[in-house]
Image: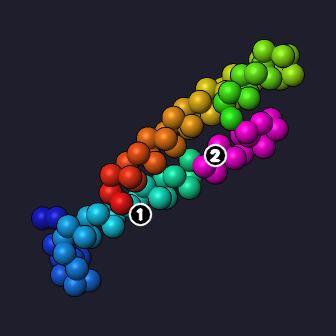
Amino acid sequence: MSAIPKISSILNISQEDLEKESVKAYLHIKLVHCESEIFNIAKKYGISSIEEFEGRYEKGEIEEEGTWEDFFKLDHLEAEKESIKKALEVVQ
């Protein structure tokens, strides 16, 4: 049996509101984690975006060897961040 009916009863809120607030909290936590990882990679290379990372590769300012993993991770994180923001708009 789902815990949602029990918890909504204990908290005296509707199941719908509990589900909505739970999803919002989950998405906010995911967004903060994602932004934290983006910040750490950006700080490591002195960049602010995947575009800047790529531009610095092209200029030879960042060595490709040993940094591609971070490049692809940053690209993935920026896409994930946008997806989370879109999902948050849905539940707002």
The chief SS type of the magenta part is helix
Q: Residue 37 carries which label?
A: 2
Secondary structure, mark 1, is: helix
- Within 10 Å of the Cα at label 2, are there few (<14), some (14-19), or many (20+) other Cα atoms? some
Q: Is residue 89 left or right of residue 59?
A: left
| Front in this rendered view, residue 34 or 7 | 34
| Residue bearing mark 1 | 25
* Relative height, residue 17 to residue 33 (above, below): below
| Front in this rendered view, residue 83 or 73 | 83
Picture coordinates of residue 70 (x, y %)?
A: 68, 30
Q: Tell me the quarter of the image containing the N terminus.
A: bottom left
Secondary structure, mark 2, is: helix
User: Residue at the location (33% across, 64% down)?
Assistant: 22
Magenta-highlighted residues: 35-48
Q: In this view, does 8 lie to the left or right of 61?
A: left
Q: Earlier in the sequence, mark 1 or mark 2?
A: 1
Picture coordinates of residue 30 (x, y %)?
A: 48, 52
